[in-house]
Image: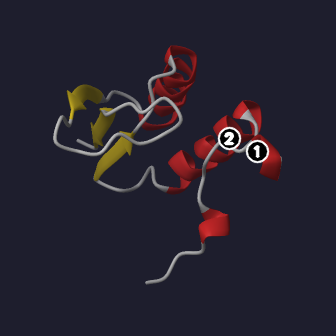
């Protein structure tokens, strides 16, 4: 299956996709995937404010979830700040 780069959900002010638009689109994604039995999201993000908004959206739409953080020391550093920390959100339906 091929996915278009233009469909990627990324905050990009140059494409008119600010934080508020991103969170609204993210909520739409969560609603469309709510029926999936086991859901896993991986974020490469260190901005606490954005992560809190993501947590809130996941909790509102999917309900309870588990959160894990990990660092990949052998992975190349990506992003404008060169971080290598990832956050994983896991939700399961009963």
Q: Circle 1 sits in a helix, a strand or a loop, which is it? A: loop
- Disc 2 and disc 1 in contact, CB within 8 angstroms: yes
Q: Quadrant of the C terminus?
A: top left
Left or right: 25 in relation to 66? right
Residue 51 lies, in percent from the top left, at: 49, 23
Compared across the picture, whether 82 is left or right of 56 comes to left
Residue at image location 57% in from the left, 16% down from the top: 49
Residue 11: image x %, image y %?
66, 42
Q: Earlier in the sequence, mark 2 or mark 1?
A: 1
Above or below for 77 versus 67: below
In the rendered image, residue 93, in percent from the top left (x then y), is placed at: 28, 44
Q: Local crowd at mark 1 within 10 Å, few (<14), some, or many (≥20)?
A: some
- In depth, the one of 42 and 55 nearer the eye is 42
Residue located beneath label 2 in the image: 22
Between 1 and 56, the one nearer to me in the picture: 1
Q: Residue 50 shows which numbered tag?
A: none
Residue 94 drawn above or below residue 85: below
Which one is in front in this view, the residue at disc 2 or the one at disc 1? 1
x 51%, y 21%: residue: 47
The residue that appears at 60% across and 41% down in the rendered structure is 27
Q: Mark 1 points at which residue?
A: 17
Mark 2 to mark 1 CA distance (whole Å):
6 Å
Quadrant in the picture for the N terminus: bottom left
Colouring chosen for the image of the structure: secondary structure
């Amino acid at each position: 299956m091929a996915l278009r780069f233009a469909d990627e959900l990324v905050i990009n002010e140059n494409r008119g996709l600010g934080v508020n638009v991103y969170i609204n689109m993210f909520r739409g994604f969560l609603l469309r995937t709510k029926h999936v039995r086991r859901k896993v999201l991986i974020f490469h993000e260190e901005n606490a404010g954005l992560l809190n908004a993501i947590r809130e959206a996941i909790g509102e739409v999917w309900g309870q979830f588990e959160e894990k953080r990990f660092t990949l020391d052998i992975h190349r550093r990506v992003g404008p700040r060169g971080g290598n920390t990832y956050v994983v959100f896991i939700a399961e339906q009963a």
